[in-house]
């Protein structure tokens, strides 16, 4: 199991967690509590009360840790060092600008945004350091950020198949988009390897119960094929990756605004994979 212990160079950050009652946010809170990170407060959906559907995580128990709706976020951030969020991506349109206004570093997991969201996200990047990964698994980040950036064999085509449970809201997955981008014709790391007229990588999505996340990269040449597969065996990989990203961002202690990838933070994650 990967080490989720943060290094002890700085005192643990006071963290505000959005989506702390959801599957991902709840698990993040549990890992943060195991590592003695103080949860300064949590953000819940407007119109709901503290507690709720299946009860709050132990670390965010009612009466012990403040729970606010998005209108209360700015006040909560005044006493916080870090914002960590596991709400659906579109909800960040309301939350993340408040975090930028407060000047707090952020680690964000939500997916499902549109290409038209790029403008406001770029403005956030001008104001605070933040990590926003569509997939916080270490293996997927290595695959998309390092492994697939190399040159394809001559004459090869590529495509992506992604499989998730029926409850997944976005299609294709954010990770499939990242993989397609890594394999795209505009890949700056491998100039000249693909013709400008080359079509983007095709992505196929399947929604079927019980699958936490499967991504396959198909590379096909004349009479041969390479297939690379990443399978999530345990949904905990996402919460652990989020915690590692939050720890790394905190240990980096660099107030320079800008978006960091998980791969950018490898040195603070204990070296390169
Ligand atoms: N990047 C990654 O590695 C990764 C991994 C897994 C999932 N995800 C993404 O993370 C997001 C959450 O996933 P999940 O499985 O944890 O979902 P979930 O179990 O449905 O939880 C969603 C959480 O978002 C909160 N929320 C929803 N709408 C809100 C609003 N308008 N204002 C404030 N809070 C709101 C909910 O708050 P209430 O409890 O108050 O209703 C809930 O706590 C999704 O976009 C998912 O695709 C990303």
Image (tube, rainbow, N blue to C red):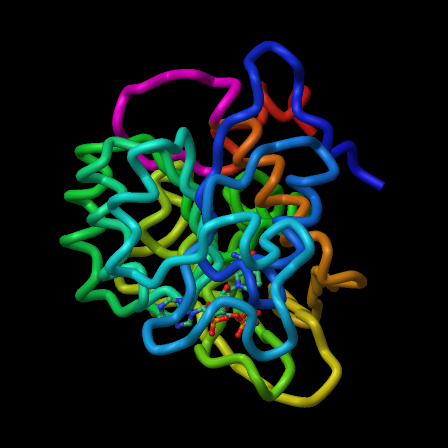
Instruction: Name the residue nearer the viewer: 144 or 120.
Output: 120
Q: Which residues are magenta?
A: 250-261
Q: Is residue 258 magenta?
A: yes
Identify which residue is drawn at 48% across, 58% down. Answer: 86
- Residue 87 location (% of width, % of height): 44, 64
Q: Is residue 83 magenta?
A: no
Tell me: residue 48, above or below residue 36.
below
- Residue 181 location (% of width, % of height): 40, 56
Q: Is residue 263 visible?
A: yes
Side of 52 relative to 165 (left or right): left
Numbered-mark total: 0
Identify which residue is drawn at 65% across, 76% down. Answer: 54
Tell me: residue 2, above or below residue 214.
above
Tell me: residue 109, above or below residue 37.
below
Q: Is residue 111 visible?
A: no
Side of 122 relative to 175 (left or right): left
Instruction: Name the residue nearer the viewer: 110 or 192.
Output: 110
Which quadrant of the rendered structure holds the C terminus? top right
Q: For residue 180, which quarter of the picture?
A: bottom left
Instruction: Name the residue nearer the viewer: 25 or 108.
Output: 25
Which quadrant of the rendered structure holds the N terminus? top right
Identify which residue is drawn at 42% across, 34% down. Answer: 82
Instruction: Name the residue nearer the viewer: 93 or 198.
Output: 93
């Amino acid at each position: 199991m990967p080490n989720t212990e943060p290094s002890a160079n700085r005192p643990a950050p006071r963290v505000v967690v959005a989506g702390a009652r959801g599957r991902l946010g709840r698990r993040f809170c549990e890992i943060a509590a195991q590592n003695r990170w103080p949860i300064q407060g949590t953000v819940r959906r407007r119109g709901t009360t503290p507690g709720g559907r299946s009860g709050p995580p132990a670390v965010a128990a009612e009466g012990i840790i403040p729970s606010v709706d998005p209108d209360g976020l700015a006040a909560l951030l005044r006493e916080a060092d870090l914002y960590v969020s596991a709400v659906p991506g579109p909800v960040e349109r309301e939350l993340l600008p408040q975090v930028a206004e407060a000047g707090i570093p952020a680690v964000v997991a939500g997916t499902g945004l549109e290409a038209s969201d790029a403008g406001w996200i770029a403005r956030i990047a001008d104001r605070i350091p933040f990590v926003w990964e569509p997939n916080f698994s270490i293996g997927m980040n290595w695959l998309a950020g390092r492994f697939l950036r190399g040159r394809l064999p001559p004459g090869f085509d590529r495509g992506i198949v992604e499989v998730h449970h029926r409850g997944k809201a976005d299609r294709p997955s954010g990770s499939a988009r990242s993989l397609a981008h890594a394999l795209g014709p505009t890949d700056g790391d491998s100039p000249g390897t693909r013709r400008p007229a080359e079509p983007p990588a095709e992505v196929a999505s399947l929604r079927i119960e019980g699958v936490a996340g499967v991504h396959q990269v198909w590379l096909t040449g004349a009479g041969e094929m390479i297939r690379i597969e990443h399978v999530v065996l345990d949904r905990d990989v996402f919460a652990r990756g989020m915690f590692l990203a939050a720890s790394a961002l905190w240990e980096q202690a660099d107030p320079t605004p800008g978006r960091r990838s998980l791969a950018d933070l490898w040195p603070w994650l204990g070296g390169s994979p």
